[in-house]
Amino acid sequence: DRMRILNPDCHSEPKGEIRDLGLVNTADSLAWLEVQIASGKDNVRKNAVFALSLLPPQQAVDSLRTIIEDSGRDQELRETALFAMVHTDSDLAYAYLDRLLADGN
């Protein structure tokens, strides 16, 4: 299985079929992404983490924070979540990162 995040401005040529999932509510999307993160292959898991950052700001920050702070998860996935958090354009994300950096001092 492969998962790729696309948007209307994406100009890449797919090698296979693209299945448009249509409009999915945030709760269903979050639940599906969490399943992919828990049980998918590494590339699927990473893409699912990046997809979390595209959710509405509160859900994106909460779900990424959960991964970042879970010391039971593998380090690479936590790093991917931190990278995704940094690249969200959200005041909530920046407030979390400010607290995270302040706690490290």
Image (cartoon, rainbow, N blue to C red):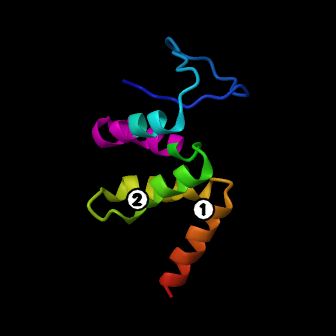
The N terminus: image quadrant: top left
Instruction: Work out which residue is located at the far bottom of the displayed protein and give it.
Output: 105
The residue identified by callout 1 is 93
For mark 2, give the secondary structure. helix
Q: Determine the image quadrant of residue 66.
A: bottom left
Q: Is residue 73 left or right of residue 102?
A: left
Residue 67 x, y percent position in the rendering: 39, 57
Q: Is residue 2 magenta?
A: no
Three-letter amino acid code at the position of disc 2: Thr
Q: What's the residue at 36%, 36% (across, down)?
A: 36
**Which badge, 2 or 1, comes first in the chain's sequence?**
2
Q: Is residue 98 left or right of residue 35?
A: right
For mark 1, give the secondary structure. helix
Residue 61 x, y percent position in the rendering: 53, 56
* Structural crowding at the residue carrying mark 2, measured as other residues with C-alpha within 10 Å and reported as few (<14), some (14–19) or many (≥20): few
Q: Is residue 35 above or below residue 86?
A: above
Q: What's the residue at 59%, 43% (across, down)?
A: 54
From the viewer's side, name the closer residue of 75 and 89: 89
The residue identified by callout 2 is 66
* Structural crowding at the residue carrying mark 1, measured as other residues with C-alpha within 10 Å and reported as few (<14), some (14–19) or many (≥20): many
Majority secondary structure of magenta residues: helix
From the viewer's side, name the closer residue of 58 and 98: 58
The residue range painted magenta reads 34-51
From the viewer's side, name the closer residue of 59 and 20: 59
